[in-house]
Amino acid sequence: MARVVVDVMLKPEILDPQGQAVQRALPRLGFEGIADVRQGKRFELDVAEPVTDEALARIRELAETFLANTVIEHYTVRVEEAEGAEGAGAGAAA
Amino acid sequence: MARVVVDVMLKPEILDPQGQAVQRALPRLGFEGIADVRQGKRFELDVAEPVTDEALARIRELAETFLANTVIEHYTVRVEEAEGAEGAGAGAAA
Amino acid sequence: MTPSTQSEPRTAPAPRTALDTVKHAAGTPGADQPWAELGLKQDEYERIREILGRRPTGAELAMYSVMWSEHCSYKSSKVHLKQFGEKAPGQPENTAMLVGIGENAGVVDIGQDYAVTFKVESHNHPSYVEPYQGAATGIGGIVRDILAMGARPVAVMDPLRFGAADHPDTRRVLPGVVAGIGGYGNCLGLPNIGGEVVFDDCYQGNPLVNALCVGVMKHEDIHLAQASGTGNKVILYGARTGGDGIGGVSVLASETFEEEGPAKRPAVQVGDPFQEKLLIECTLEIFREKLVAGIQDLGGAGLSCATSELASAGSGGMRVELDTVPLRDSSLSPEEILMSESQERMCAVVEPGKVDRFLEICEKWDVIATVIGEVTEGERLEIYWHGEQIVDVPPRTVAHEGPVYHRPYERPSWQDALQADDAAALPRPGTGEELRAATLALLSSPNQAAKSWITDQYDRYVLGNTVLAQPEDGGMIRVDEETGLGVALATDGNGRYAKLDPYAGAQLALAESYRNVAATGARPLAVTDCLNFGSPEDPSAMWQFAEACRGLADACRELGTPVTGGNVSLYNQTGDTAIHPTPVVGVLGVIDDVSRRTPVAFAEQGQLLYLLGDTREELGGSAWSQVAHGHLGGLPPAVDLDRERLLAEILIAASRDGMIDAAHDLSDGGLIQALAESCLKGGNGARVVVPDGLSPFVFLFSESQGRALVAVPRSEEVRFNDMCGARGLPVARIGVVDGDEIEIQGQFGVSLRELREAHEGTLPALFAGDAERAGA
Amino acid sequence: MTGGLGRIGVVTFPGSLDDSDARRAVRLAGGEPVELWHRDADLRQVDAVVLPGGFSYGDYLRCGAIARFSPVMEPLLEQARGGMPVLGICNGFQVLCESHLLPGALTRNDHLHFVCRDQRLRVERTDTAWTSDYGQGQEITVPLKNGEGGYVADERTLDSLEAEGRVVFRYVGGNPNGSRRDIAGISNEAGNVVGLMPHPEHAVETLTGPTTDGLGFFTSVLKRLVTA
Ligand SMILES: Nc1ncnc2c1ncn2[C@@H]1O[C@H](COP(=O)(O)OP(=O)(O)O)[C@@H](O)[C@H]1O
Ligand SMILES: [Mg+2]
């Protein structure tokens, strides 16, 4: 079972009210030094077969036509290798 | 300017109606072979200074207490290196 | 702590090279300018040069091009709209119209020192491109118009038109539009009290999203958009300015999609209803402390519109330092800042001594506010960018003296054939079984089916003053908790009727809306309209528009209900094919005591059913002809405005004196539609007898106007009959509220359960369970 | 009505919508509504507090997540732990869950749409500060209107809520949002803090509500304040 991750974010020129609301709350929580916050969507697709180039191309098409609204959003598609392998991540306590 | 990404996903045992709705729509769009879809949130934090271990620890605290509701969600925090460096991603057409 | 509102402005960077200043423009008369790309015609460009005595700067060109677009200047429609003011001026014998056409919205006196302002506007093209945000920002825009008059917005309505209900693109557009209207209106805390949903192939490539807002204020609180008083400060407050919808006004609203093609999608605006909620509360607090001399919302054409309209309506000039405008994107050029349609912004003119308090209130509400300029002595609108003058124009020439076109119009060649194609020739149901089947087919058709799948996504309770909300003939809002004073509103527009005869179609739209308001027990007072038509460059569409304006203005005069404001949306077409002409008419009524309102539901068994008005064989443009035969032809039902007025008087008197417990006006779908809706809403059946001399089919399905169905308590029967008789309104007792089925005696019966399944199942079956766009 | 009016505070956060309705409901029930502002550092000597419905901070991030950090929440949490009656309606319920004054969380409706309808509820517990005027098992109808009203908690929490009798309201006649075990509202252990998704403050007048079933919330707490 492989996992493909599609990240969908509002285009930079589009207003992101959610990200803004988060950013404006930060000083109140005592957080400084964060210049900008953008909030987007993350889709985790569990794919039954190995992810061939062709499968990836189809998922990219899915992202383009369905997962993202390309009028206002852009997206990235990537295959996620082993779970949790990428960097400083830490799952939260249960 | 560095970027820290916080991914927040519903815990596996929590119903994810949005992910399910996407999954249900797939056959109609002609997509097969996707076993599961989960939808979560992606936060991109632009941090003014270089991301020290200490800064990262504080962001993790932010994720724990604010960006995620750990009753229902878990999260990962990671520093994103160079933009777009990670894999098969493709920005959508403008 | 909350971020300070006045500090940390991300203002514009130092000028880049090649700033097109006024001085530079004067010295380079031959420079090439993209006037055509901006939608200006050659002669319009020449006129700008003439007005200025030189070529315009880039910033000036941007301003003129957006303000002279069809959407902002009404250049094709103006000459026809004039009739509204001329034929039904609204004073003094009619409605006390306190503010008329020309302001953000009209204002009407409803007594007890209260005034009401209301207006309907279109957001058609943006909603096709991006349904959720297009519809959401449509609500946001009309709410700011109402707010700018000094009123607290108290309710919204949403007249909608979509393509075929089962077309795949409708499954993209409708759920997004509905979610957008709900998402914005719900978050703003405004009850949605009514609207329309109509499906027709003609709207497939061009859905209509109209939005209405109504607001309430005391007389003394009326505010106007004008900049007066030399030295007064101009304050921009609300959201930061970003690159949203730049050129959206001219590109989105004035050009057809065909020309643009789907590839060159214009930037759309994203709404932030939370920001707008803060803007509303902040602005109302500013009004309460009497801190503004003039105010204007920012909508289409953004700052270009707000500054030029404020300056044009005021006594002096205005000077603006454009680089003080707080930005979301610091790379914006001055032209872009002037054209940006970023949402949730307002512009106020404030006396210098009141500026501090103004800013304080903004800070309290976390609203960014910035002094961007001041009212000057001269008569020019001057805009500076880092100290350099980039705009120097007479503001009236931008805002109020745009081009005026007398577009050619001509009755289309196909109109005669269309009218000759009489619906009377269509095969009809004859037996009781056939009538039963026709009834179920009608009530389950998308247009005639229950709309609760849509309206259940709208909050109708918030603010706690909703007395009637959909499904009712009109929405009703309590204005004063002590006295029970209230207002009722309805919007209507039948594009099929208007296609058959645009003059009559516009009158029928008004008649229906008027009748709906009267059916609630309220007295109709005033009108707002949104005129949705095809391209004014097409003489046929222009004829439809001219006829509709003439018809509406004539009808307003006869009914004594002036048009107080509205909106024109042209270029609603796909390729060469225009939508049906669709005049949407909103009527506002007043009721002294909302506890007297009349609902549509038949709540009590045993009450008597009376049909008011005359039933003739009128099937042209009817719902039956569409559902049973996919037919559109013949003439629409006859208009009789005297009859409408009489019917309204009876409905209002009967409500005031407690003679009726339920009323439902008859419109599309005829008697059977009204009967079914009132029975289903009340959970009670009815036994009905076909009057002598009428065929059961005509009785049930004809769409003759000037009719209503009422439920009369037995104790009131004599009094009610006497009143109708005395006033000369034909009435017929047709049955009684009874049992749990609708029985048309001697013809057929259908249980409420079966009827309910047919009526309420259609929209969920079409739209529920669809993942719209993922995660919308 | 008795001599001293109960002073019931209604908090307004940026984006609160049903605050004026909550104040009206308090008034119609015979209490004295007191406006509280999210930046207030104290509760102005109120006897009880309502966190009203709406979209505080636009419901951005998560419903109630940002409001939870408002200054007014500090004294509120403290006094709620000390036994002061607190009612969270809809967004207010979400704030109470985000503040961990009540367990669990509210998630997106399972059908993904905002829903506004007249909802039947069964009163499962009548010894809370806000439900004593109802009968055990009584069914009431009040408006429901939300997009994120699905109540979730892990099985252990759900089991202990049931065991301790802290499920105060359950949906009847169809679960409108996928809430676990049809839960519409819950209370803390002491019963002074209650949260629910439906809106009793919209059912206090025949003219504007489907019923007047919601008045009991406010008369309950006022009685309790008098006898306390
Ligand atoms: N169909 C119409 N009927 C009457 N008045 C109209 C109509 N269309 C536009 N108007 C009036 O013309 C003026 C300009 O309209 P508009 O540009 O929509 O106003 P705003 O600048 O407030 O958006 C307004 O007063 C509006 O009410
Ligand atoms: Mg009607």
Image (spheres, coloured by chain):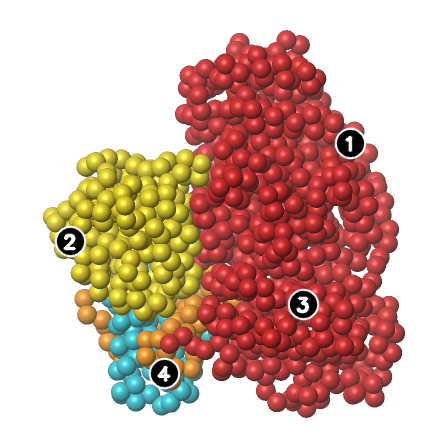
Chain colours: A orange, B cyan, C red, D yellow
Q: Is residue C575 left or right of residue D38?
A: right
For mark 2, does the 10 Å Cα neighbourhood hold few (<14), some (14 to 19), or many (20 or more) residues? Answer: some
For the point 61% across and 60% down, the residue is C148
The answer to whether residue D176 of the structure is visible from this angle is no
For mark 3, does the 10 Å Cα neighbourhood hold few (<14), some (14 to 19), or many (20 or more) residues? Answer: many
How far, Cα to Cα, is label 4 from label 3? 36 Å
Q: Is C415 rendered above or below residue C293?
A: above
On residue C306, which mark appears?
A: 3
Q: Amino acid at mark 1?
A: Gln
Q: Which corner quadrant of the image does residue D220 belong to?
A: top left
Of all chains, the one bearing label 3 is C
Residue C115: give x, y in percent of width and height.
62, 48
From the viewer's side, name the closer residue of C148 and B70. Answer: C148
Q: Amino acid at mark 3?
A: Ala
Image quarter (top left, top right, bottom left or bottom right) of the N terminus of chain C: bottom left
For mark 1, does the 10 Å Cα neighbourhood hold few (<14), some (14 to 19), or many (20 or more) residues? Answer: some
How far, Cα to Cα, is label 1 from label 4? 71 Å
Ligand 2 within 8 Å of the CB at mark 2? no
Mark in the foreground, 1 or 4: 4
Mark in the foreground, 3 or 2: 2
On residue A32, which mark appears?
A: 4
Residue receiving disc 1: C419
From the viewer's side, name the closer residue of C113 and C475. Answer: C113
Q: Amino acid at mark 2?
A: Ala
Mark in the foreground, 1 or 3: 3
How far, Cα to Cα, is label 1 from label 2? 74 Å
For the point 28% across and 52% down, the residue is D87
Question: Under tag 3, what secondary structure?
Answer: helix
On residue D190, which mark appears?
A: 2
Mark in the foreground, 4 or 2: 2
